[in-house]
Amino acid sequence: MDMTSYIFRRLAAGLVLALTILLIVFMLISSSFEDTARSILGQGATAEATEALMEDRGWARPILVQYGEWIMQAVQGDLGQSVFTSLAVLPEVMARLAVTLSLIVPALLLTAVLSVSLGVWAASRGGIVDRIAQLISLVGHVLPGLLIAIALVAIFGVQLGWLPATGYVRFGDDPAGWARSLIMPVIVLVIPGVANMAAQVRGKMIDELNKDYVRTLRSRGLSPRKVVLKHALRNAGSPALTVMSLEFIQMFGAALIIENVFALPGFGSYAFNASLQGDIPVILGIAVFGVVLVTVVNLATDIVNGWLNPKARVH
């Protein structure tokens, strides 16, 4: 299969998957329409008033009809307004998403660099170096992210005062302050990310270094550095890329906790507050961006893997 056909096939599959997931989310959220109507009206609302509000909002119509209209509006960039603040959902979600991505992107890049370096170093050196790398991965797996966050805040934010314990500074207001406000949250995301990804890279590199073509290259007199970095690492790159896309998704989910611990006005904290309030338009808007973002990351990973490894295009 040529690359163009592969890309179109993956795009079609991604679109169907995204629409299916959003339908499931919409159906799950629809069960809380009545509760949200009562929250708007207050605890003393009568059943008649609640039913009238649901009729007015269109929440009493068939679910598939509501879903179809909501999707059509979402495609046009209209995600509605918050039930409780009356603010347009789209600009609010975009602003919050920018904060979350400013946290996740540097964390993911740092995780990739450290993981590949540690994994390649452990696989190629072996011995005590390999055991140290495995110990680092084990510690990263064992330590809960919430515990790491609390420890960092207590030490570097409260006791030493080197970094702000909580809060977020916009890049346009103070670039240095923006960087300082993200250092501790990024570290919290990087530690478990490196623990997971380094172990994956190490395992794949060990498999590659034990293959026949590596022994052949070594017998021809190629330097160990060239064999490892130019040949073995390249062949191990496709699985590592898949692991990195999974790390992005995990970090995106971890932001729900991290942003609340560090009081960051990001996507995760916005989703958390909307869920507590039962703000249906906000929850659905968050679902759209979350599903689209994850789908795009997976599609990009599949396309790059298909380009690196033509055999992957037949699946």
Image (tube, rainbow, N blue to C red):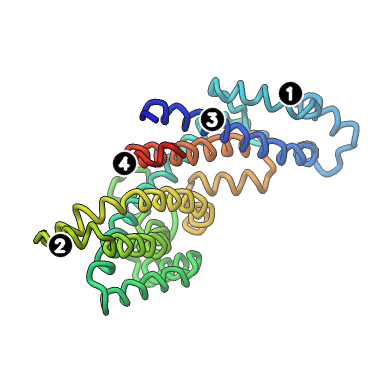
Task: Give the residue type that dot 2 points to.
Answer: Arg
Of labels 2 and 1, earlier in sequence is 1
The residue under label 4 is 308
Q: Residues within 10 Å of mark 4 (few under 14, many from 20)?
A: some
**Residue 306 image point, x, y percent:** 37, 38
- What is the CA distance from the residue labelled 2 to the residue labelled 4? 24 Å
Task: Give the residue type that dot 1 points to.
Answer: Val
- Asked which secondary structure carries label 3, the reply is helix
- What is the CA distance from the residue labelled 2 to the residue labelled 3? 46 Å
Of labels 2 and 3, earlier in sequence is 3
- What is the CA distance from the residue labelled 4 to the residue labelled 3? 23 Å
**Residue 271 image point, x, y percent:** 58, 45
Please name which of the two marks, 2 or 4, marks the residue nearer to the observer: 2
Q: Residues within 10 Å of mark 3 (few under 14, many from 20)?
A: some
The residue under label 3 is 15
Of labels 4 and 3, earlier in sequence is 3
Q: Do callouts 3 and 1 mark residues in contact (Cβ within 8 Å)?
A: no
Q: Is residue 178 visible?
A: no
Q: Do callouts 4 and 3 mark residues in contact (Cβ within 8 Å)?
A: no
**Is residue 139 left or right of 17 when viewed as pictured?**
left
**Is residue 35 left or right of 164 when viewed as pictured?**
right
- What is the CA distance from the residue labelled 2 to the residue labelled 1? 64 Å
**Residue 315 image point, x, y percent:** 47, 39
| Residue 157 placement: quadrant | bottom left
The residue under label 2 is 218
Of labels 1 and 4, earlier in sequence is 1
Please name whichever residue, 141 or 265, is drawn nearer the observer in this view of the structure.
141
The residue under label 1 is 65
Please name which of the two marks, 3 or 1, marks the residue nearer to the observer: 3
- Asked which secondary structure carries label 4, the reply is helix
Name which residue lies at 59% across and 28% down.
79
Please name which of the two marks, 1 or 4, marks the residue nearer to the observer: 4
